[in-house]
Image: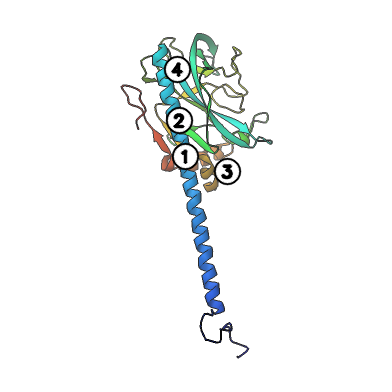
Amino acid sequence: MSKYSVRLSRTSGGGGGFTLIELLVAMGVIAVLAVLTLMSMRGIANDARLASATNSVKAALDNARAMAMKNNTIVLVVFRPRLEGVHKQKQEVDIYTAKWTGESAFFIDSFGNEKVKDRFVPIPAIVVRTIPAGIKIAAPFYGDNEDDVWITQSHLPAIDPQAGAGEVRGKLIAVMYGPDGTTITRNSQSDSNQIFVDFNNDGLQLISGDPNDQASEDDEPFLAMAPFLAVFDDDEARELKTLEWSNSAQGETNYRDELTGPLGYITQFADRIHFNRYTGVVMK
């Protein structure tokens, strides 16, 4: 056999052998199929996480609506991020159900205006739900900046509350039900301007920075009431991001462009949860 031949030796019968090129091609095909299989399995797992989170949110909303009607009171569902892990670099979002205590208080906002805030507390009888790690909740934004479409929770591992540095701060998003079971965005019984949940039930509102944003997992900022919700995979959004989302003018622009803006990830890929406008029932 010539020393330049790339053909492997065959059996004496002349069959059953493979050339080196054929083996390399076969190995390449197997590698490609393995990568495609892993990608497909990962996509299925991500879809399952998102579906699980959406179902958990819907169940919590249904339960809160039933509680409001049963007790003839105002009840809300709030989505609160929490740090997990030894180094506090993992974030999960807990679903709390809270009720109005009947307490309201006057306060002065940052512009010197006198306003009224209502105090809500978690309902002990309702177990706090936790949605799969990496999934977040968003709500539509109504404000002066036309580039904003959504608001969502803070990414606490990327925020330094002491230094005021890190990523753009997020909001605590809530859905509120009136005694008749319909969704409401304002407490007409107190005519309050703001609502907060006293998570530790100490009678005080804990705020480490802007009262409308969350910079620390212990913060109790004012809630952003949502007329409908979006559930999205924040981990995947961060894998796709190419710009910095820092707490700066340019960072906020990048944040809107890639996550919360009209062409951002939430607009394109989130699952939506809407409510019947007359009954408050979650639309399936």
Image quarter for residue 221? top right
Q: Is residue 8 above or below residue 193?
A: below
| Three-letter code, disc 1 | Leu
Q: Position of residue 131 (x, y in %)?
A: 51, 33
Would you say residue 76 is visible in this rendering? yes
- Density class for disc 1 (Cα within 10 Å; few <14, some 14-19, many ≥20) is many
Q: Is residue 208 above or below residue 47?
A: above
Mark 1 secondary-structure assignment? helix
| Numbered label attached to residue 244 | 3
Mark 2 secondary-structure assignment? helix
For the residue pair 146 and 3, the one nearer the viewer reads as: 3
- Density class for disc 2 (Cα within 10 Å; few <14, some 14-19, many ≥20) is many
| Three-letter code, disc 4 | Val
Image point 51% across, 37% down: which residue? 135
Evaluate if marks 3 and 4 touch, with contact meaning CB atoms under 8 Å apart: no
Image quarter for residue 272? top left
Residue labelled with disc 1: 50
Evaluate if marks 4 and 1 touch, with contact meaning CB atoms under 8 Å apart: no
Kindly give the residue lying farthest to the bottom in the view shown. 2
Residue labelled with disc 4: 75
Evaluate if marks 1 and 2 touch, with contact meaning CB atoms under 8 Å apart: no
Image point 55% across, 26% down: which residue? 213
Q: Distance of mark 3 from mark 4, alpha carbons?
A: 37 Å
